[in-house]
Amino acid sequence: MSLDLKGLKFVLHSTSVSEDDDRKPLENLATEKSNSSSRKQKKSASNVDGETVIHLQDSEGSDILPKDAAGEDVDEQLEKVLTEAESREAWGSKTEFLLASIGLAVGVGNVWRFPYLAQKHGGGAFLIPYFTMMIVEGIPLFMMEYALGQRMKQSAVRVWNNVHPAFFGVGIGCMLVSFAMCLYYIVIITWCVYYFFVSFTSDLPWKIEYCPGYAGYSVIKANHSVWSMKNQSIWLNSNITAKLKKDMDEYPDCCVHHPTEFYWYRRGLRVSNTMESLGDGINWKLFGSLFVGWVITYLCVLKGVKSSGKAVYFTATFPYIIMFILFIRGVTLEGAGDGILAFFKPKWERVLDSRAWMDAATQMFYSLSIGFGALIAFSSYMPRKNNSSNDAITVVLANCGTSLFSGIVVFSFLGHRQHVTGTPVTDISPGPGLAFITFCEAFLLMDVSPLWAILFFFMLILLGIDSEFGTLEGAVAPLYDLKWVTMRKEYFMGIVAIIFFFVELALVCGNGFYLFQVFDDYSVPLPLLIISLFQVLAIGWVYGIDKLSNDIEYMTGSRPFFFWVLCWKYISPIAMAVVFFTSVAKTAEEQPTYLVYVGCIQNPFSSLFPGASNSTKRITYPPWAQALAVILVLASVFPLPIYLIKNWPKNWRQGFRNVFLSGWANYVPDPSWYDKSRRIPPVQMEKIIRQEDLAILKMQMMREQEKKELTSKA
């Protein structure tokens, strides 16, 4: 809803569910009559001492909410209710809020995706596009979502409806993409839980000694060691040595050639040969791990921010303790310096590669959880008088700093691996393979290897759980805000957990890893980019940067920095549009493929594909999987055009002229720089916001009164 004050519009956020009320400006509500069966009501607005005051009256002009028996004024009653409402659902402290936000932003992607992308795109050279995207996208959008949530104190769906009803679909898209994220992200936690438990052994189970064909291989290897020590100038000795070396290289057991890779695919995931085959069906070890993952997640979100706020003291801080321990151990290993040098050594020619910039932008969105709605939900539980801008910068820097720190930790271990085995530092597996293949190989080279594996996978579990329950909170909050769900939160969360658990059984079958790739590639990245682009356009050109700046000045005491304003209006939308069209063009020109396990060259996994040196191969998705990918993209995006068309304003031509043809003010990053009357002092903003809240509570009480009357008549 919007409120006219001295010719200016301000957002009036409503906690009601009725779309009819939400789509009507308050000035229209002043003359509109509802169809209540009990009485006809109208809302009017008058101007007293320069301040707009909202009145709720019936058709005879008397107040709907009279003074109570004790003579207490209605506004005094509502002040008490408002104070109670503002403190009912809130973080226990600002520390809880910051830890929860850091836990939401910092996830497993910081540990395995960022180091891989850095190495892929030129080491230290990748830091240029990465930190550039942090400045022009990460911080501005993070700051924007924090400010909107704290100002309107509602979930993403309600916030974007308040910006303009045509953007109601943006909030729905945030909710849907959050559910999509929760659906498959828990599977990563499942893998970590499995590896965590199997690491509680005296010897890690992916050691070469546990390979099924190791007995025969060890004999050949021992004989080769003996013959290789003899004089190779003698023809017989060199011939036998060469023959034994050939037998070792061609030994028909993939496990002895790549033990960690074999364990990951064949014993951990128990993959099938293609996406269209279930293989051995449900992997019961992963089934149990999935159950454990959902139990932990449910306990963290059981009581909303009350329970998650307490959980983050452990889940958000302990990973840093473990990471620091791994850092100390990693940098003291032989060869660690070579690995860290390889991580930072720049290949400057890669800076101009468009793919590096696209991956940097995608990583920034994905890592910071921008566009999911969780940031808006988290900040809505904070008091309005809080410096949300500083909070946003703190969390973004913590997230990006964690990525950089984890890269140092990862490459220190890879440097040690290179020192011992000769395997190049740059030979790393992408995505989950970095944790479950490359890192596991490094653990085998260390003393007390099970201890380091336990610490590492426990750290990944905590990082994943933080992101999972934070995103789930952001997905569920709108359902309560819209009154689509009214049952107690612990019951509803339990229902969601059970439903998701059974759906995710498909992801722990033989072809589950292949299905996971469909979700990981298509359900979040592109929809998130589209949603975020709509968000920044809505704020910059519909809501107005001057209004957002007024809100921020009221909440923080100062207006936003010039550069952030410029980003909201121009830089961020342009950067996101470029990334979006580049992503679409890249997707259109390439066949959609997924990574399938084919086994080693010496012993292919199946007759369908020959083996490969790295035991994997990319093949084209089957038609039904391509259709699923399209559905996953459209599922989160389709509400945007639907509600944009449905709620398109009837006077859009006038609105277009007001924005684009009414002078230079609207083209200035902050129109209040040009038109001083559009800047509202914090004292006046205080009156406006308080009046908005009181009006909302009056409407709520009016509806509750109507419901009681209808119930009594029934």
Image: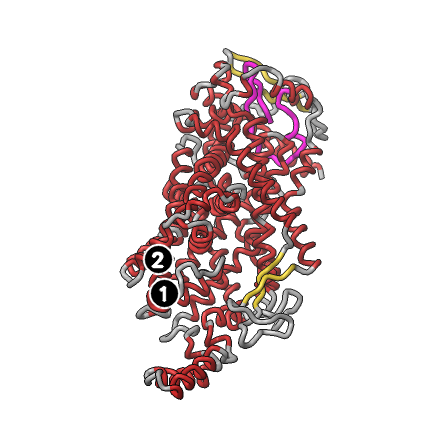
In this rendered view, identify the residue nearer to me: 159 or 515. Answer: 515
Residue at 58% x, 50% y is 179
In this rendered view, identify the residue nearer to me: 482 or 251. Answer: 251
Q: Quadrant of the N terminus?
A: top right
**Three-letter code for the amino acid on which mark 2 is drawn:** Gly
Judged from the image, the secondary structure of the residue bearing numbered disc 2 is: helix
Magenta residue check for 47 = no
Q: Where 682 falls versus 506 (above or below)?
A: above
**Three-letter code for the amino acid on which mark 1 is drawn:** Arg
Q: CA distance from mark 1 to mark 2?
A: 9 Å
Point out which mark residue 417 bears: 1
Which corner quadrant of the image does residue 21 belong to? top right
| Residue 437 spot, x, y in % from top left | 45, 65
Residue at 56% x, 67% y is 597
Left or right placement of residue 531 versus residue 239 in this view: right
In the picture of the structure, the residue carrying the numbered disc 2 is 339
Magenta stretch: give its range: 1-27
| Residue 630 spot, x, y in % from top left | 67, 50
Q: Is residue 399 visible?
A: no
Q: Quadrant of the C terminus?
A: top right
Point out which mark residue 605 bears: none
Left or right placement of residue 164 versus residue 432 in this view: right
